[in-house]
Image (tube, rainbow, N blue to C red):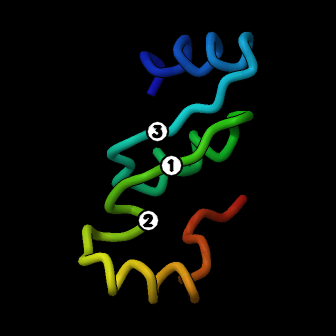
Amino acid sequence: MQTARPFFSIAQAIDASVVAEGVELANQARFVETLENASLQGWYVARPMPVAEFEKWMDAPPQPKVSSQ
């Protein structure tokens, strides 16, 4: 994750949003949650799914798994 920090710093400096792809672990998600203008995507959030299932998931997504503890 330390190798990713400079990229997030550059994005923050130019007020750009960043998507951290491939997030699979809680510590990776917690790292992304500490950053400004960053969101995450990956198996930690949800597995790949067909469009119809995704639409249902978007209507009632599960609560985030990341906590401040």
**Up-down relation of residue 37 to residue 6 (above or below):** below
Give the residue number, with chain letter if any, for mark 1. Answer: 40
Expressed as whole percent of the image width and height from the top left, the position of residue 51 reads: 31, 76
Disc marking residue 45 = 2
**Mark 1 and mark 3: span between their CA atoms?**
5 Å
**Badge 1 vs badge 2, beta-carbon distance below 8 Å:** yes
**Mark 1 and mark 2: span between their CA atoms?**
8 Å
Expressed as whole percent of the image width and height from the top left, the position of residue 6 reads: 55, 11
> Going by the image, does 68 lie left or right of 47?
right
**Badge 1 vs badge 3, beta-carbon distance below 8 Å:** yes
In percent of the image, x 58 and y 41: which residue is there? 32
On the rendered image, what quadrant is the N terminus found in? top left
In the structure shown, which secondary structural element does the residue marked by tag 2 occupy?
A: loop
In the structure shown, which secondary structural element does the residue marked by tag 1 occupy?
A: strand
Amino acid, disc 2: Val
Label located before the other in sequence (1 or 3)? 3
On the rendered image, what quadrant is the C terminus found in? bottom right
**Up-down relation of residue 5 to residue 29 (above or below):** above
Disc marking residue 20 = 3
In percent of the image, x 39 and y 62: which residue is there? 44
Viewer-proximal residue among 61 and 43? 61
